[in-house]
Amino acid sequence: MITLKDATLQRDACLVGGAWIGADDNQFDDVTNPADGSVLGRVPRLGQAETLRAIDAAEEALPAWQARSAKERGAMLRRWHDLLLEHQEDLAVLMTAEQGKPLAEARGEIGFAASFFEWFAEEGRRAYGDVIPSPQSDRRLLVIKQPVGVCAAITPWNFPAAMIARKAGPALAAGCTIVIKPAGQTPYSALAMALLAQRAGIPDGVVNVVTGDARAIGRAMTESPKVRKLTFTGSTGVGKLLLRQCADSVKKVSMELGGNAPFIVFDDADLEKAIEGVMQAKFRNAGQTCVCANRIFVQAGIHDAFAARLSQEVAKLQVGDGAEEGVQVGPLIDAAAAEKVVEQLNDAVAKGATLLQGGERRGANFLTPAVITGATPDMDCFSEETFGPLAPVFSFQDEAEVIRLANATEYGLAAYCYTRDLGRAWRLSEALDYGMVGINNGHVSTCEAPFGGVKQSGLGREGARQGIEDYLETKYINMAIE
Ligand code: ADP
């Protein structure tokens, strides 16, 4: 049980065309707290039929929404932003209860989510077109930007609010309407945001949220010709499946998929800054972010000192229920997630790694943050995304070797590099085959900058000026003036 100042924020119905609905067959799914397994409540288990109705509602709302000025749409987004911040505490409590992350991180995520509404409220007013000098004197060539149309969004459980805001913000600002399917583990954050969208005065049908059967909802979204764009954040496997499903109706797609971030520390780095950075990049959200440091490469000369300091810091991390004061690492989302990390740890130790710290399973979902040294490329923690609190340290000799190792993955989301050599910082920034590079810092996400990956980490960018482009079509007009 959780207590909210505004209890109406915990919704047990879905928002479709401005109405709060249940499943046609009255089915529900339980929502549980990963910290103790308690049932927080239940949300409707919708399927294909209800999703198609939500798509119809989004289509119906589209003409009036896109006809409004970007300034008007921006004012509503801005109100949505304000309401998120007004209810930041309740939304954080709700998020921690269903997701597990420490309250301080949940509060931070609500602020981060709100920042996308604020940013795109402004950015929508700058969806500029072009006037192109014509090769013929009696013609004028113009380019205008128009909303893509009805969008569908499928979002993950690791950032239950921010991943919605990063999609709904630019969609609405551009003049699109949206149907959102949050992850089954974290529907309450999404439903609370939908309620606040209503309170912000966003018209019925512009924002719709459906919870329930992921496959059936995903099929309805991808098969409907009315949906012009699918935006997805989640695993690479599901992303590939959805890409295939979108092929038949040639939808626009944005994909934010998995990562396998290298965190590179050269001998000349500021050791303490690197430790601070890796603690943030590795253990935020219990290691469950797609930009988490997955492989920590440390140059031989600084390796032992780094590993010792890292173990010291990791030993201080407080593990427990995220709702408790002082907890820094909450539970993993479920037992399977914890199991996967334990398997990676066992695999590494079996192949010769040394466990320096942690790695203790506590209950089904908790794992004490672990540090291993002697990690090598034949280990699963090198090739697979860990998505948990395991920090494998690899030793390397020189720049060419670490660039080769860092890029030896099908992923290409975030990379981090610590060095005080300016030339090296540039060389690494260019050589790392990643969509985002943090130089001497372990945290790159911000609404003003383009978030996204290369290779199998995804398609498209979220946030920044580029983020709204993904929700706009380019129309070229060739006008004869005589
Ligand atoms: P994770 O491993 O982080 O749970 P997933 O890719 O499984 O990542 O989940 C991300 C989102 O994709 C969630 O909202 C989930 O419900 C949804 N999802 C999972 N499988 C499917 C599917 N077959 N079709 C549509 N959505 C899906």
Image (cartoon, grey):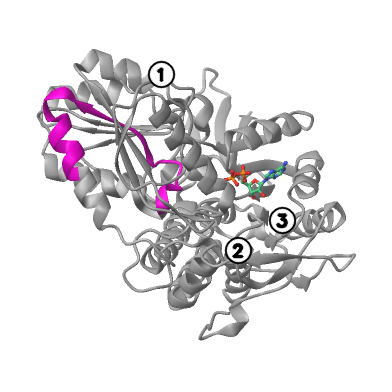
Horizontal side of 271 relative to 146 (left or right) equals: left
Query: Closer to the N terminus: mark 2 or mark 1?
Result: 2
- Camera-nearest residue between 360 and 140: 360
Residue 219 appears at what percent x and percent y?
79, 42
Q: Amino acid at mark 2?
A: Ala
Query: Closer to the N terminus: mark 1 or mark 3?
Result: 3
Answer few, some or many: residues within 10 Å of disc 3's Cα (few below 14, many 20 plus, some between 14 and 19).
many
Residue in view at x 42 percent, y 44 percent:
465
Verify CB contact (< 8 Å) between mark 1 and mark 3.
Answer: no
Helix, strand or loop status at disc 2: helix
Q: Amino acid at mark 1?
A: Ala
Horizontal side of 318 relative to 64 (left or right) equals: left
Q: Which residues are magenta?
A: 286-309
Disc number lying in front (1 or 3)? 1
- Camera-nearest residue between 27 and 173: 27
In the displayed structure, would residue 389 be above or below residue 17? above
Disc number lying in front (3 or 2)? 2
Residue 126 appears at what percent x and percent y?
45, 49
Residue 1 appears at what percent x and percent y?
58, 79
Q: Which residue is mark 2?
A: 190
Residue in view at x 50 percent, y 31 percent:
457
Q: Which residue is mark 3?
A: 62
Q: Which residue is mark 1?
A: 408
Horizontal side of 378 relative to 391 (left or right) equals: right
Residue 476 lies in the magenta-colored region? no
Q: Amino acid at mark 3?
A: Leu
Residue 63 appears at what percent x and percent y?
72, 56
Q: Quadrant of residue 391?
A: top left
Disc 1 residue: CB within 8 Å of ligand 1: no
